[in-house]
Amino acid sequence: MIWLRRVLTIPLILILIVILFIALLVTQVSNTAANPEFYNDLMREADVYDFVYDDVIPAALDQAETGDTLAIPVDISNIEGELVSVARTIFPPQWLQTQFESLTVTVIPYVVGDTDNFAYTLWLKGRVISSGDAIKDEIVNGEAFTYVYNDLIPYMSEELFNSLGALPPSVTITQQDVENAVRITVTQEWLASQLEAAVDSVLQYLSGDSDHFTISVPLQTVVTDEVLLELLGDGNEDYLDEARYWIDGQWSYTDADLLNELDSNDEETLQDVRNWIDNGYTLTEADLRDALSDNQGALDDFDNIRNWIHTGRTWLWSLWLIPIIFVIAIGFLGGRRWKSRAAWALGSLFFASVIVFITIVLIYSNVGEPKISELKLNLDEYQGVERVMAEKGNELIQRSADSFVSGLKANTIYAIIAPGVGLMGVIGWYIVDHRRKSAG
């Protein structure tokens, strides 16, 4: 009779293997996909926050040099390092990490159905206003300003030369003459002081404290009559007033110039950004639902998934009752006394856990990894910033899969160790019992 009962344990053990695998898999999904810390750990391990400054911003600057850019007469390749340093100072990696982790702990509970609403606000105004000091220290008053100066002077000289009116027949002025004169009068120190004021003006505009900005270089304050007379040459003093008129204006770049270079969509984006900086950018569940509202089916599916996830996580503990019941049943079918029943129960769990562990390794190496490779982006289809982002995206895909499977393996190992320790205890129980009987 006992052998028949033990034969009946075979299908139960096979079912136990399947149920244990499902329970471990569902538990790991709950511990990762529904857990903000999984994403936070993943971002830290992938060093995403430094990656922004080490790779993304330099690639964006390189791409800006070769693409369509605003009419700013400065070769940014010469000051790329300083621009990256400014960005890192204004929005340091630690700040980026704090914002992302605040976002995950706010949004993920809603996505998995644990909460019915959420609100996350990104505050930028304080950082934008304080960014002026970083810009001034790193660029305007730093070594990089030599490059800025050497780019701006030829540009301003060209603008002045093109604005020249009719010259007297005896006067011959070339663009190089204008540039030489400007270099004499417009020093780096003076130009830096003008740009410091420009930085403050632009930041006030971006932060919403002002509706306009002006970047100006009032050359008429430094280009003296002596310089103009030297350009005109002897005998042309009567044209001094006309020459003064050439520079009576000032080289400037204003918000109107910026808006003229933007199309309607870009202009709307600029105004949105200014509003976000001024008032903070708040993301709520209403924004998330609005993004899905164009497709009612997608919105319904989203709500259904939230409900299923919440229900599944709520009753996850009950899923583990099934393998526990099977283990107990196997113990009573396979054993006659408490020692043998414990041995059969723990042995079946140990065996099932080992089989599950082997199955996980085989499935991941033979099925999982090829599927993950298919999910990765083809880098040949991307260039510049997109390629850099695609490379990091592929790394995150691989890391998330490896982390998920590593956690699954770890939980399975715990499921092996626990009954293994229990079996050692049962063996010890047998030995002690045997010695007692022998001594008796």
Image (spheres, rainbow, N blue to C red):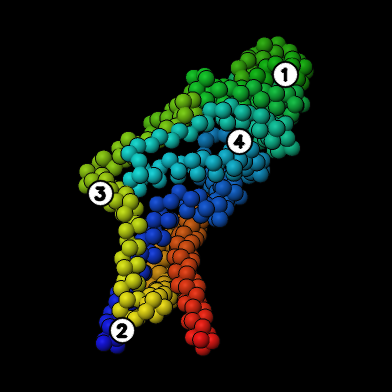
Towards the viewer: 355 or 281:
355
Q: CA distance from mark 2 to mark 3?
A: 44 Å
- Residue lying at the far left of the rendered structure: 297
**Mark 4 or 3, nearer chain start:** 4
* Quadrant housing residue 88: top right
**Mark 3 or 1, nearer chain start:** 1
How packed is label 2: few (under 14 Cα within 10 Å), some, or many (20 or more)? some
Which label number is shown at residue 6?
2
Which label number is shown at residue 304?
3
Whether residue 115 appears in this view of the structure is yes
The answer to whether 68 appears left or right of 252 in the picture is left
Q: Secondary structure at mark 3?
A: helix
How packed is label 4: few (under 14 Cα within 10 Å), some, or many (20 or more)? many
Q: Residue at x 40, y 30 (%)?
A: 268
The answer to whether 115 appears left or right of 177 in the picture is left
How packed is label 3: few (under 14 Cα within 10 Å), some, or many (20 or more)? few
Q: Looking at the picture, which amino acid does disc 1 mark?
A: Val
Question: Can you tell which of label 2 and label 3 is closer to the viewer?
Answer: 2
x, y percentage for residue 258?
A: 49, 28
Whether residue 384 appears in this view of the structure is no
**Mark 4 or 1, nearer chain start:** 4
Residue matched to label 4: 90
Confirm or deny contact between disc 4 and disc 3 (CB under 8 A): no
Question: Can you tell which of label 2 and label 4 is closer to the viewer?
Answer: 2
* Quadrant housing residue 151: top right
Q: Looking at the picture, which amino acid does disc 2 mark?
A: Arg
Q: Secondary structure at mark 2?
A: helix
Residue matched to label 1: 222
Vertical arrangement, residue 400 with respect to residue 362, above or below: above
Question: Can you tell which of label 4 and label 3 is closer to the viewer?
Answer: 3
Vertical arrangement, residue 387 with respect to residue 402, above or below: above
